[in-house]
Image (tube, rainbow, N blue to C red):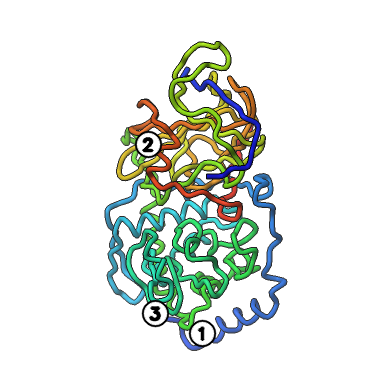
Amino acid sequence: MPARARRVAVCCGSRAWTRPFSDLMTKITGILLAFLVAIPSLGMLAVATLMNPSAVSCTVLADLSVGPIPDSLTARTRDGQSITIDRQQLTHAATIITVGAHTAGVGPTGVLIALMAGLTESTLRMLANPSAYPTSVEFPNDGIGSDHDSLGIFQMRPTAGWGGVADLMDPSYQARAFYGGPSGPNNGSPRGLLDFVGWQTLDPGVAAQAVEVSAHPNRYQNYQPVAEEVLRALTRAPTPSAADPHVPETSRIVFPLPDGTYTFASPFGWRTDPFTGKRTFHEGSDLAAAGGTPILAIADGVVAFAGPRGGYGNLIIIEHTVDGQPVASFYAHMWDMGIHVAVGNTVVAGQHIADVGSAGRSTGTHLHLEIHPGGATQPPVDAVQWLAAHDAKGLEGESIVPAGCVPTGR
């Protein structure tokens, strides 16, 4: 666990399009791609500072909010082939959509292009490649691939600079790398979608090829109808009769503060209350960190609460589905301007959702974290132990999903 010393703080967190391109179109595709490659300075975007949410903040598009994930979906490719996608593949699609929703400049068109690429390269499966990288099978995967040294949903190659094995076996990282741009992990090399000026004016298949640089550039258009159907199915608004919003199964669990930024302060359990001096039960785990340190969502989920609440000062509650069961995570003591999500926002694991502060019943800057298996109304458990039991990954700066939605009117 991270060890750099910080001021110790404690709190009392009481709960108070039909056929492949013609030869002519193929020539046009080649000309367009040659132009983009020959003039890279036109294709590069400025690199923003990852830890500065204002540099990359955006409003999450309502039409990219992921809803219920069906058990399967059947659609036809442009050449008439029927393809059925299962729930796991659709879960990866949901991650691609959600990351796109929180990446400035992507929008529905960019998400569609990413889905076309993922369907073409792997049929939206996270593929390991033990012949090239034996350790890749140690990460969660949906099968084995064998295309050179390619890995994952978008079949990205470590030798091409897309990232390491651990990076490329992470669906969220692969989506961020595909989109690229200021918040992408590769600083424009290799180039993601946003690193190509004018990508919005290209045929979606041409745009996908610009990122993938495939030896078979005309494949992507074939999957556009399937990608469109996936996007419609996963972002369809829930029916008015639905009692509660469906929270998709999370793709991973991460630690809520970046590696090297915190120390453990006050644990879960009985302790002496720092304000009253009495013996009380502390329902969270306190992680001391400097003010402004990014707070990360521990898992994919939906924001259920974001704002002031009693002794918590300011509080964020996120609802998750972990191993098929509901779980709620609480993040407390942020200052008033330290919240970067709003109720109803869909977030991804490792997303910068808030900044460490010291509001409410707090003696110094820190994160008070609670984990409630069963949902927000159920009793909490030891958050640190729960994270360890679920193999939570610590993230460094380049792996953090930037803040994507800053609430207005705060």
Residue 203: percent from the left, percent from the top?
A: 52, 72
Q: Residue at x 44, y 79 (%)?
A: 148
> Which sits earlier in the primary sequence, circle 2 or circle 3?
3
Which of disc 2 and disc 1 is earlier in sequence? Answer: 1
- SS category of the residue bearing label 3: loop
Identify the element where label 1 is drawn. Answer: helix
- Residue at coordinates 31% horizontally, 40% vertically from top-left? 325
- Using the rendered view, name the quadrant where residue 357 is placed: top right
Per the model, the C-alpha gap separating discs 1 and 2 is 50 Å
Q: How many numbered discs sit on the rendered protein? A: 3
The C terminus appears in which quarter of the rendering? top right
Q: Amino acid at mark 3?
A: Arg
- Of badges 1 and 2, the one in the foreground is 2
Residue 203 visible? The answer is no
Q: Which residue is disc 3 drawn over?
A: 19
Rendered position, 252 above or below 158: above
Q: Disc 2 to disc 3, how far (Cα)? A: 46 Å
Q: Position of residue 295 (x, y in %)?
A: 57, 40
Residue matched to label 1: 26
Image marks 2 and 3: residues in contact by CB distance under 8 Å = no
Closest to the observer: 100 or 333? 333
What's under tag 2, amino acid-wise?
Val
Q: Nearer the viewer, residue 322 or 154?
A: 322
Amino acid type at image mark 1: Thr
Q: Is residue 286 left or right of residue 119?
A: right
Sequence order check: which comes first, mark 1 or mark 3? 3
Whether residue 318 is visible to the viewer of this picture, yes or no, is yes
Query: In the rendered image, which residue does mark 2 sit on?
Result: 327
Q: Is residue 349 above or below residue 336?
A: below
